[in-house]
Image (cartoon, helix red, strand yellow):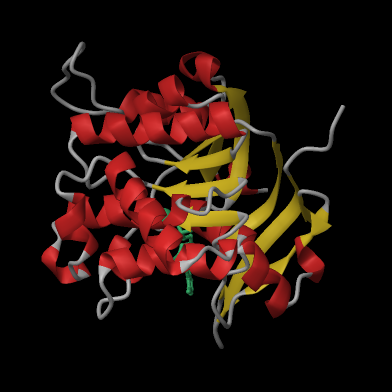
Amino acid sequence: MTAPLLSVENLSVSYATRSSVTHALRNASFTLGRERLGVVGESGSGKSTMGRALLGLIPRPGIVTADRMDFAGQSLLQARDSDWQKLRGRRMSMIMQDPKYSLNPVRRIGDQIAETCLLHLGSSRKEAERRALAMLEAVKIRDPDTVFRQYPHQLSGGMGQRAMIAMMLVAEPDLLIADEPTSALDVTVQNEVLRILDDLVQKRGMGLIFISHNLAIVSSFCDRVLIMYGGRILEQIAAKDLAKAQHPYTRALLAAAPSLDQPRDTLATVVRDPAWLE
Ligand code: ATP
Ligand code: MG
């Protein structure tokens, strides 16, 4: 059996202030192959923190510890700044929850995407621009030639999100962490973005970590799902078995999801057990 793309053991992230410590991620252990791994859990459960830790992007004063964090045979725990620079954007990328923070406000969209190709793929300027334009087309931006020359503030939220997705995918990374990548998109564009991500997994063998609040999308789109609560991975389950999950928190999340098939007057409240964090 070949080694997984990503192998994580006991990854923890904490933020200490003078008076308290926030355990944003507690002893997360999982592996990722060339597959679609969904991550669900309520707000504050540590999903984005886990994604950022995997890319070495936890800001000070955050403290990251792990027994193992291997990516494609390389230990990320030993990675220096120069190693991260070679990895991030080229071999591993993250579509951030809010595109506003990922696009440079004073540079044209096309230049930002082309720069990734210049920097990481060593393309010529002409080739980089060609790839950038092709990627804008691939994420179904309607008038890619115009958007290529525009600045981020000239785009709508959904367009900005698609431009950012184009920027993250243009170097064809081996690992993509997508943090709520479709939340600002309408349903048809959402499906198109999912199709692009799926293509990259199927055809190029990319590994995808797909963070979402939408249990219906995760159960139909992903292969496996991690369920998080209070910084812990409570359960790992095949996506097709999500509806049959046994953990009381997962059951509560499923019960709290609104459904068009079975409208209810009141949604169930999630009752939490402190033992889940032990
Ligand atoms: P959401 O669904 O709302 O995006 P999430 O599951 O992505 O939530 P995280 O953003 O990972 O949650 O946050 C997990 C915990 O870590 C939260 O309690 C949050 O307050 C804390 N946290 C995150 N970043 C910092 C920081 N820079 N300093 C202190 N605490 C932080
Ligand atoms: Mg988040």
Please state the horizontal and vertical placement of residue 242, each as a whole percent of the image: 50, 20
Left or right relative to 125: residue 183? left
Residue at point 57% right, 82% down? Answer: 60
Quarter of the rendered structure image containing ligand 2: bottom left
Task: Report which quarter residue 201 is drawn in.
Answer: top right
Residue 249: x, y in percent? 49, 32
Residue 23 in view here: no
Residue located 77% across and 38% down the image: 4
User: Would residue 159 be found to the left or right of residue 236 on screen?
Assistant: left
Instruction: Tell which of 28 and 99 is nearer to you.
Output: 99
Q: Is residue 252 visible?
A: yes
State the image quarter where residue 209 is shown: top right
Q: Is residue 102 above or below residue 139?
A: below
User: Between residues 18 and 54, which one lies in front from this camera angle?
Assistant: 54
User: In this orientation, which residue lies closer to the viewer: 101 or 147?
Assistant: 147
Does residue 271 sit above or below 110 in this rendering? above
Q: Is residue 80 above or below residue 229?
A: below
| Position of residue 43 in the picture relative to residue 11 (left or right) | left
